[in-house]
Amino acid sequence: MKRLAILSLLANLILGVLLVMPRARPDAASSSGSASTGPQERRTPTTTNLVEITRVITNASPGFSWAMVESEDYPTYMENLRRLEVPEWLVRELILLELGRHYELRELAELGDATEHWATYSERLRLRRERANARVALALEERDVMRRLTGTYRHGEGKDFADNDGFHWVLGVLPLDTAREAMSELVLQYEINQLLEDQVGLVTPSDRQQMLAGFNLARNRALSLAAPALTEEFWLRLQVLLGIMMGDFDFPGLQLTGPQFRELIRIRFQFIDPIADEFSNQPEPTGAELAQRERNVRDALAAVLGEKLADDYARSRNPAFRTIHEFTEKQQLPIESAIFIHDVRQAAINEVRNVMTNPQVQPEQRLEHRQMVQRETEALLFDALGPETFQSYKENEGAWLNRVGGSVPSDDAGGAR
């Protein structure tokens, strides 16, 4: 047993000596003779009784870190980017992106939805209005800060509009950055008006005036961003685009050249401006008010483009003609058929009116005369449409034919009257 203990002690001593003896590294010989390039390194071995630790001391510069550039102070951040020779347009885009994210987070933190179950109706209305005003103030602050730091304003949805290929025929008349800013101004104002409308409850006439004033300011700012010729073309095309989207640009049977169509847009928006009405939450005009607006457009067109074109425009906006046009489209008939039916209908209406207002026609003769007008009108339409189409028209959109002999249809009435 004593012999085994002695052998074990000797083995441990030998193992300890082997562990502390310095050993040549495999790469030492190959690297010692090579030329020195790049940063110089000095390796300092440190020996313990169990492991070898090597500290590497180098004079190489520290690696790049984005934290060396970023700063919570935006002007400093911009200067750091410029020192890295980042292009100015990219500096602007990065800052605009950061500002957009910053204000989005601020809105969530400061103006998140609050419960109002404890409040009375008047208190809830007051709180909603206060939050709406706070959101408006924050949106305006974002625009002002963006403009002060970068020279432009960028609203996320406004940029999306400008970058959308489907709107290029409208916005492509402006340089891209100008189109983005112009649409940002308009979208911002629409967003502000929607905030007021959604948060204040009942929209008052004073609210509508405030919305309309804001829209006019936004439009003027948008139109001031480029040369007058460019912005005029941009606004004309934008009116057409939004008019089509709102279903307000439908002129069946009206044949116009390009210059005539531009003149129609210019004149019409002096009297009928659905964009301004939409922005200011104005009630959609109907009845006598709408008819008067259309008459104003018709008279202005007549003074510039002539009576014939003005009459064609008035016909295209007539509810009765539009009903007739829908019928002929369903029957796959040409526009000339709709115009013919409308002219026959209007002639019958005028004849009935003449009979009813003519003092020389005796009362007992009026009914007979009106029944004759009805028979002649039906014969004309029967020949033009054919038996089946005429019967379908008379039973539906042409129900006014059955009343020609009994009451006078209004020229502003729908086709079924």
Image (cartoon, helix red, strand yellow):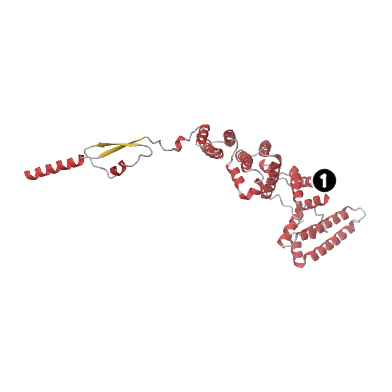
Camera-side residue: 20 or 93? 20
- The residue located at (60%, 46%) in the rendering is 163
The residue indicated by pointer 1 is: 303
- Quadrant of the drawing holding the C terminus: bottom right
Q: Nearer the viewer, residue 273 or 205?
A: 273
Nearer-the-camera pick, 314 or 161: 161
Figure label count: 1
Q: Amino acid at mark 1?
A: Ala
In this picture, is 302 found above or below 129?
Answer: below
Q: Position of residue 396 (x, y in %)?
A: 74, 60
Tell me: residue 78, above or below residue 385.
above
Location of residue 67 by image quarter: top left
Task: Please state which of residues 31 and 17 is positioned toward the viewer in this rendering.
Answer: 31
Residue at 78 percent of width and 51 percent of height: 313
Q: Is residue 115 visible?
A: no
Task: Describe residue 13's horizontal placement relative to residue 407 as left or right.
Answer: left
- Determine whether, in the image, residue 10 is placed left or right of residue 220: left
- Residue 381 vertical position relative to residue 414 in the rendered view, above or below: below
Residue extending farthest left: 2
List x then y, in percent, for residue 254.
76, 53
Q: Is residue 69 left or right of residue 156?
A: left
The picture places residue 376, in percent across and down from the top left corner, at 84, 63
Which secondary structure lies at badge 1? helix
Residue 37 position within the rendered picture, expressed as x and y whole percent measured from the top left: 37, 39
Q: Determine crowd level at label 1: few under 14, some 14-19, many 20+ residues with C-alpha closer than 10 A.
A: few
As drawn, 379 above or below 407 = below
List the single residue furthest toward the right.
360
Asked if residue 61 lies left or right of residue 130, the reply is left
Q: Quadrant of the N terminus?
A: top left
